[in-house]
Image (tube, rainbow, N blue to C red):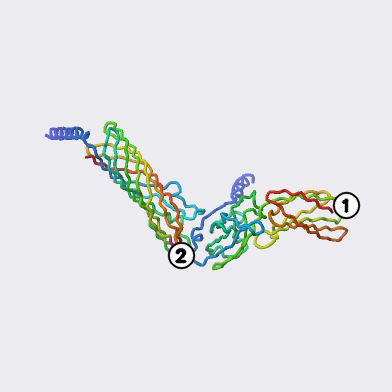
Amino acid sequence: MKNKLFLLLPLLLLLLSSCHTQTDDFISKHCPGSCTVIKGKLTTDDRSTPLAGVKLEVNWVTRDIFSSLLRRKAITTTDANGNFELRFLLREDELVRDYNNGVFVVNAQIDQSKYLGCRFYEHLLTYDKLSRDTTIIVNYNLPHRASLYLQALNTSAMSTGDAMLVSAIFDYGEAGPAPNCIPTVSMDIRNTEAAILVAANQDVIIRTVRRKNGVETTTNEVVRLTPGQNLHHQLSF
Amino acid sequence: MAMRKLISTTLLLVLCFTAFGQDEQNYSSTIRVQFGGAIPTGSFKSKSFDEEYPPFAISGPLLQVNYARTIKDNWAVGGTFALRRNPFNLDKFAPKGDELVLHTDSEPWQSVFTLADLYYQHQAGLNTLYLRGSLGVAFSRRASVTVDTSFGTIYRAPDHGVAPAYGLHAGFQQNYSRFSIGLETGVFATRPVFEVQGSNATYKQSMATINASMFLAYAF
């Protein structure tokens, strides 16, 4: 019995170890026809400043329990006005819509210390369904980075059922606040301080939702930070 | 009888070699015909997806004709005419078995070199070692590619460019009277300007190769 387990163990490890493959799809990159196009403008500072010279790439990524595949589809660089165009050809396996189908991811090569990232830093855009002969127009705002240091006051006054939720809302991504990218913290008697990354050179709405004795109130404050600034902000419960 | 014939023939051959050896010192000029391979190096071998126009060059043939004339002691001057071809790596660009690809075709990268040479050579018995520096012009042609797919055709057009070229080679030859055989290795490089297909923009393409050749030489 012991011997059988020892024989099975390497096989199990082999099965569990993932196999990563990356391929370059040159046929797609030089799309001869029926192309899918993602085009638009990349900006910062509340869409007022174009981001020039940024390399953008679209990849098709699929993974299962044993392996993952990254197929590079197209690459481009934003021009002096921030304009870009990614043109590529979808293959049959990229059109199949089933449970384990991959996703198309648009990445940007940017200085992560200067610009604000979202959930997966380099991913600007994600599409799980694309079609041939399709043009998607995207005007994307990628803010400069600043930080808010939040400090909650008077949390000792909180009783059971009371809460204070603080969110920072700002224009990010394709149009307006991106729901997945709104930093939110819950502050209470144990958690009185928090640091969050926010946009610089544009309005940031600090929305505070207070629940006191079952009554909910919402307050909004607007701040504007400079790139790299760390602003201390106090909130009273 | 047979033994006499054998001895006589051997003596005759030895005498001939001796005669040729005495004449060898009077030859001031050499023509070499070389054939070998050219291996792309640097950005010339690139097949990077991140580049706008990766060259996809792979190893190809190199034909050279060199003329050299001794001017003083170990120094010689001369000229080189060379033809170099490096195929486009179609297997990497459009792999066989790709379900989209119906047909592929390509013409190789090509450079014709016309160079002036300066030699430093050292005689060691019947052998000659030399270094050759070359400077001149190369007439180059960009590889063309055609890939027919079920969605249309991908076509990279050829283009021509003229640019300065240089070479640096080291060789070894074994001399047999007027004739010699030898080996040579070195580098040829040029950087022509090509037009971007479909626009007025241009780009510079480095075309450098590491070469290895065998040659036959004739001294006169």
Q: Which residue is mark 1?
A: A157
Q: Label 2 belongs to which residue?
A: B149
Q: Position of residue B26 (x, y in %)?
A: 21, 35
The residue segment tinted magenta is: B149-155
Locate residue A36, reporting x and y percent: 55, 65
Q: Amino acid at mark 2?
A: Thr
Asked whether residue B131 appears in the rendered view, the answer is yes
Most common secondary structure along the magenta stretch: strand
Residue furthest top in the image: B125
The chain containing the residue under callout 1 comes to: A
Q: Is residue A102 visible?
A: no
Q: In x, y percent, where is residue B9?
A: 15, 35
Quarter occupied by the N terminus of chain B? top left
Indicate which label's residue lies in the foreground, 2 or 1. 1
The tag on residue A148 is none
Front residue of this view, candidates A135 and A21: A135
Identity, as a three-letter code, of the amino acid under mark 1: Ala
Q: Nearer the viewer, residue B143 or B1?
A: B143
How far is the residue under mark 2 from the one under mark 1? 71 Å
